[in-house]
Image (cartoon, grey):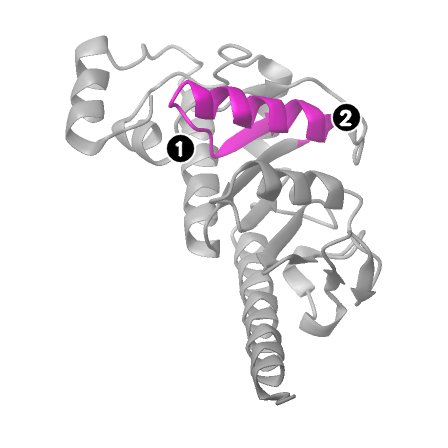
């Protein structure tokens, strides 16, 4: 048998893993530099083929080292790096539930955690549709009731919501964990990061205005749906 195809496939996979490592480190550095994460709170993962890369448990996202990221195989068994984050199950199940999800970010972003403490708009939508870009780039964000960090029951709740929203043709890109912050996902690092940034900044705006602004009216939401295919 000619081993070349499998060797080539292995090389391509290794290169994809290396690119994912670099992306995770870049995102962690950027989030830390801009104050979206602090200390060792939060985690980042990337799906590469049927493997997952995820930040190690208690890692400081602003000071990640590519070679220390945890690499996990298709069975969920770790094969390289430091011990995987306790939220590994949640990340893997999000990617399994949403085929477009290949990059997942969880932070303890200040304004979003503050929002859960002050009171969200509703359990189904933690923020009202305040701005057109929130509607277009973020969409609906449900609240997940408080569970301890790493509780596997959170994955059950999140994946059920992903399925329900997909069935209603209003797919979600994020959830907000009560007292723990957002979990966002997308097909790549840039998309997931854009969702996180827009979500955090909208929470900041709403809190800065004492939660007084009215949502966009129905006719404005209809226009965003028809013009930009917004899933709201």
Q: What residue is rendered at 67% in x and 22% in y?
A: 157
In depth, the one of 181 and 15 nearer the eye is 15
Quadrant of the snapshot with the N terminus: bottom right
Quarter-wise, where is residue 226 in the image? top left
Residue 209 percent location from the top left of the image: 40, 18
Please tell me whether residue 125 is drawn above or below residue 92 in the rendered image. Answer: above
Q: Secondary structure at mark 1?
A: loop
Magenta run includes residue 97:
no
Lower sequence index among marks 1 and 2 = 1
Please tell me whether residue 224 is drawn above or below residue 10 in the rendered image. Answer: above
Please tell me whether residue 107 is drawn above or below residue 19 in the rendered image. Answer: above
Q: Which residues are magenta?
A: 153-180
Please tell me whether residue 207 is drawn above or below residue 69 in the rendered image. Answer: above
Magenta run includes residue 162:
yes
Assess disc 2: are there few (<14), some (14-19) or many (≥20) residues with their C-alpha within 10 Å of its C-alpha. Answer: few
Location of mark 1 (residue): 138
Location of mark 2 (residue): 153
Q: What residue is rendered at 64% in x and 38% in y?
A: 108
Any mark on residue 9, and which? none
Q: Secondary structure at mark 2?
A: helix
Tell me if 23 is positioned left or right of 88 in this view. Answer: left
Indicate which label's residue lies in the foreground, 1 or 2: 2
Assess disc 1: are there few (<14), some (14-19) or many (≥20) residues with their C-alpha within 10 Å of its C-alpha. Answer: many
């Amino acid at each position: 048998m000619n081993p070349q195809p499998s060797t080539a496939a292995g090389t391509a996979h290794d290169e994809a893993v290396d690119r994912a490592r670099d992306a995770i480190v870049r995102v962690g550095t950027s989030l830390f530099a801009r104050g979206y994460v602090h200390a060792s709170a939060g985690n980042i993962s990337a799906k590469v083929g049927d493997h997952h890369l995820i930040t190690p448990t208690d890692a400081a996202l602003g000071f990640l080292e590519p070679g220390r990221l945890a690499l996990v195989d298709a069975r969920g068994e770790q094969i390289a790096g430091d011990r995987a984050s306790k939220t590994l199950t949640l990340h893997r199940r999000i990617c399994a539930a949403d085929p477009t999800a290949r990059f997942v970010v969880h932070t303890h972003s200040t304004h979003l955690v503050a929002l859960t403490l002050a009171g969200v708009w509703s359990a189904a939508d933690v923020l009202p549709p305040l701005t057109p870009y929130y509607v277009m780039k973020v969409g609906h964000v449900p609240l997940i009731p408080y569970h301890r960090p790493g509780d596997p029951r959170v994955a059950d709740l999140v994946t059920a919501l992903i399925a329900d929203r997909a069935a209603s043709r209003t797919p979600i890109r994020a959830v907000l964990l009560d007292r723990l912050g957002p979990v966002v996902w997308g097909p790549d690092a840039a998309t997931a990061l854009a969702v996180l940034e827009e979500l955090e900044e909208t929470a900041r705006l709403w809190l800065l205005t004492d939660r007084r602004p009215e949502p966009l009216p129905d006719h404005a939401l209809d226009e965003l749906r028809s013009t930009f295919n917004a899933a709201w």
